[in-house]
Image (cartoon, rainbow, N blue to C red):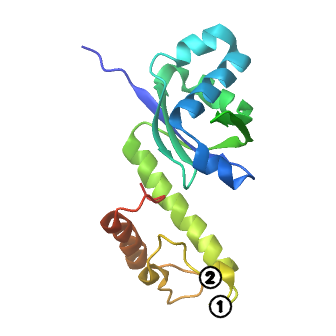
Amino acid sequence: MVRFKNRYVLCEVVSEDPRCRQCIEDRALQLAVRDAITRVHGDYGLACCSISFTVKYLNAYTGTVLLRCRKDSYRLLCSALPFVRYLESRAQRYPCFLNTLHVGGTIRTCQKFLIRYNRTQLLRLLQNCTNEESPAARPAPWMPEAALNTDCVGHLHRRSTKSLISACRDTSVDCCCF
């Protein structure tokens, strides 16, 4: 029997309204993406993409979304993602757009990319801090104090990043690492 190959598209929900991220549901996101595919590619595109299209992972706090589709039709999906302009949830429309971060063959490669991406975003935030008392220098509520151990200017050591990831696993907090 032949195995069906899939592609996993890692996206980020970008919105100016902070309520948008906390109100999104996988069903609403799936309907918005299917609507965008229909508008861009018509019934043919919808039929090609809907064979194995699912939302595999959705983190409402970080806005991270992992979509799965067939390998043959992932280009149709990726070309329709910029046309998602809003999400409907609980009878309200929230304007937003989807930023495609990575396309991978397995969930594991997408997880590895997401960890690297979050590490670089954390480094950018730390480089913009001027001193320890600035509001931007305060850690996020889910971040342990030990994770901000910096010996070099603007460089986060691999050991402290691993402790950040293990602290997220140990505290069972829904964070951006997974």
Q: Secondary structure at mark 1?
A: loop
The vertical placement of 166 against 100, above or below, is below
Q: Secondary structure at mark 2?
A: helix
Q: Is residue 156 left or right of residue 4?
A: right
Give the amino acid type for the residue marked by disc 1 in the picture: Glu
The vertical placement of 120 against 66, above or below, is below
Which residue in the protein does label 1 denote? 133
Distance between the alpha carbons at the discs numbered 1 and 2 = 7 Å
Q: How many marks?
A: 2
| Residue 154 position within the rendered picture, expressed as x and y whole percent measured from the top left | 59, 82
| Residue 89 position within the rendered picture, expressed as x and y whole percent measured from the top left | 63, 36
| Residue 111 position within the rendered picture, expressed as x and y whole percent measured from the top left | 42, 50
Which residue in the protein does label 2 denote? 137
Residue at point 45%, 83% (across, down)? 145
Quarter of the figure with the N terminus: top left
The residue nearer to you, when weighing 19 against 58, is 19
1 and 2 marks in contact (CB < 8 Å): yes
How many neighbours does mark 2 have within 10 angstroms: few (below 14), some (14-19), or many (20 or more)? some
Q: Is residue 34 left or right of residue 165?
A: right
How many neighbours does mark 1 have within 10 angstroms: few (below 14), some (14-19), or many (20 or more)? few
| Residue 157 position within the rendered picture, expressed as x and y whole percent measured from the top left | 45, 79
Query: Among all residues in the image, which is located at the extreme top?
Result: 43
Query: Among all residues in the image, which is located at the extreme front?
Result: 91
Residue at point 67%, 16% (across, down)? 38
The residue nearer to you, when weighing 145 against 77, is 145
Residue 66, numbered circle: none
Give the amino acid type for the residue marked by disc 2 in the picture: Ala
Quarter of the figure with the C terminus: bottom left
